[in-house]
Amino acid sequence: ERLNTELEDTNRGVVALYAELDGRAEQLRQASELKSRFLSNMTHEFRTPLNSILALSRLLLDRVDGPLAPEQERQVSYIRRSAESLTELVNDLLDLAKVEAGKLEVQPGLFTVSELFGALRGMMKPLQQNQAVELVFEEPYGLPPLMTDEAKVAQILRNLISNALKFTERGEVRVSARLERPGQVIHFVVADTGIGIAGEFHEVVFQEFSQVANRLQGQAKGTGLGLPLSRRLAELLGGTLTLRSAPGAGSTFTLSLPAAPAAASGVSPAGAAQ
Ligand code: ADP
């Protein structure tokens, strides 16, 4: 009899606990939705004035109304660069908010790695300002065309390559791709000979607003959003983004993706992977 009463009490306790947990989960979900909505509204509001600042500073620098004095030109360049990095931050924030809210869509298409590397080479070359660092794209021989979201793959690789160039003083930044059979997983690899990242920071760098090297080097650059966003994008594409690195030994970031994610694309993987 006593045992029964105790059991019933326990049962009631468990039920109440579940109800409370449910309530908490709902509260958390609402809070998280509110956060996403706030972030995306806010970033939208930031964009309009930023675009004016950018457009007008470019106009001034293009000297439509006659040449600027050297000092003015320096100042306007600074305004433009600041507006550019703020735009980058706002875009990254908006993308992060969208991924978290499940609102960033995958837009699959068929493309070759050669084409992708060609486009990236053109885009990234201007960033390679240090003569002591070479940016190398390995020609991807024998890779089948891929069926995935090319713009998002390019966005991730741009992030990785610009980081690699930023944190490498001499040597090279090497971009390559290889197919893993029989899993049909494509690995994109961005390897640098830069300062490297200590093991204790390997997870930290994927967290929002973390800038390890700033602590190491005492320099403030970037937003600390590039890697977290890149990892979320990789996951959105059904893949992973991993890091192998040691201080002084360079860093290797690997983006691994299903070579033909048929489920996401609705297109037969057989056709895409031949
Ligand atoms: P950001 O580059 O804008 O600071 P990221 O999220 O892209 O933000 O990178 C976070 C931090 O990870 C960087 O500030 C840096 O400390 C470290 N990091 C990223 N890529 C590299 C790299 N290739 N080599 C060394 N450190 C890196």
Image (cartoon, grey):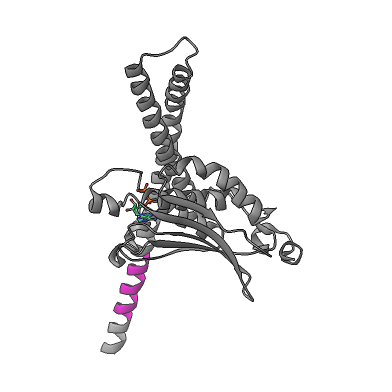
Q: Nearer the viewer, residue 120 or 5?
A: 120
Work out which quarter of the rendered image holds the N terminus and state it: bottom left
Q: How many marks?
A: 0
Q: Nearer the viewer, residue 122 or 270?
A: 122
Residue 249: percent from the left, percent from the top?
35, 64
Residue 190: percent from the left, percent from the top?
48, 58
Q: Nearer the viewer, residue 29 or 18?
A: 29
Q: Is residue 107 visible?
A: no
The residue lying at 36 percent from left, 57 percent from top is 194
Q: Is residue 127 visible?
A: yes
Relative vertical location of residue 191 with respect to residue 67 in this rendering, above or below: below
> Which residue is outermost to the front?
132
In magenta segment, residue 14: yes
> Which residue is outermost to the top?
65
In magenta segment, residue 264: no
The residue lying at 39 percent from left, 36 percent from top is 85
* Image side of residue 204 versus residue 127, left or right: left
Q: Where on the picture, by quarter, is residue 183?
A: bottom right
The residue lying at 42 percent from left, 23 percent from top is 53
Span highlighted in magenta in the image: 8-19
Work out which quarter of the rendered image holds the C terminus and state it: bottom right
The residue lying at 42 percent from left, 27 percent from top is 50
Residue 93: percent from the left, percent from the top?
42, 43
Q: Main secondary structure of the magenta part?
A: helix
Q: Nearer the viewer, residue 192 or 28?
A: 192
* Image side of residue 198 versus residue 80, left or right: left
Residue 34: percent from the left, percent from the top?
40, 44
